[in-house]
Image (cartoon, rainbow, N blue to C red):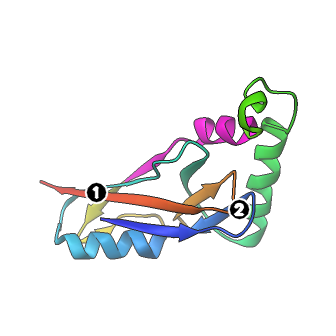
Amino acid sequence: MEFSVQTSRQRELADITEQVASAVAKSGVAEGICLAYVPHATAGIIINEFEPNIEADFLELFGKLFPSGNWRHNKIDDNAEAHLKSGFVGPGATVPVEGGRLLLGTWQRIILCEFDGPRKRMVVVKVVGK
């Protein structure tokens, strides 16, 4: 299953938990594994709490770790730090499926990290059962 997410800022986090949970429900898999994957070189996926302060903290941290600057790739399309951030975060997350539902912790959410927006991002969800 696939769905799209339209981001509205150059850098932002978007909670995609409900869309992924819907894909799990539609799969009919009761026990297994769910992979949420973003096939883009300047976006990633993390699992964490999602609220405005943690979003701001993550974006600030990513900016400190990979600031705008004189990166070699910027000579091509001026978004090297977005590529570096997405490489650091990774393109996907795997979550166990139990009882037909995502087995996330109390505060855990599946979060799309946009590093080079605004863009329309595709998210691929694969659910595999026993």
Picture layout, residue 118 above or below residue 87: below
Callout 1 amino acid: Lys
Judge left or right: residue 4 versus residue 49: left
Judge left or right: residue 48 versus residue 11: left
Residue depicted at 62% across the width and 36% down the height: 88
Residue toward you, 57 or 68:
68
The residue lying furthest to the front in this view is: 76
Disc 2 element: strand
Task: Count residues near mark 1 (Cα–Cα under 10 Å), then give few for <14, some for 14-19, many for 20+.
Answer: some
Quadrant containing the N terminus in the rendered view: bottom left
Task: Count residues near mark 2 (Cα–Cα under 10 Å), then give few for <14, some for 14-19, many for 20+.
Answer: many
Residue depicted at 47% across the width and 70% down the height: 17
Residue 12, numbered label? 2
Residue 123 position, x and y percent, is 44, 60
Disc 1 element: strand
Residue 63 falls in image quadrant: top right
Callout 2 amino acid: Glu
Picture layout, residue 78 above or below residue 70: below
Judge left or right: residue 64 versus residue 20: right
The region drawn magenta spans 80-94
Residue depicted at 25% across the width and 65% down the height: 98
Residue 42 position, x and y percent, is 61, 45
The answer to which of marks 2 and 1 sits earlier in the sequence is: 2
Residue denoted by label 1 = 126
Q: How far apart are marks 2 and 1 (CA)?
A: 24 Å
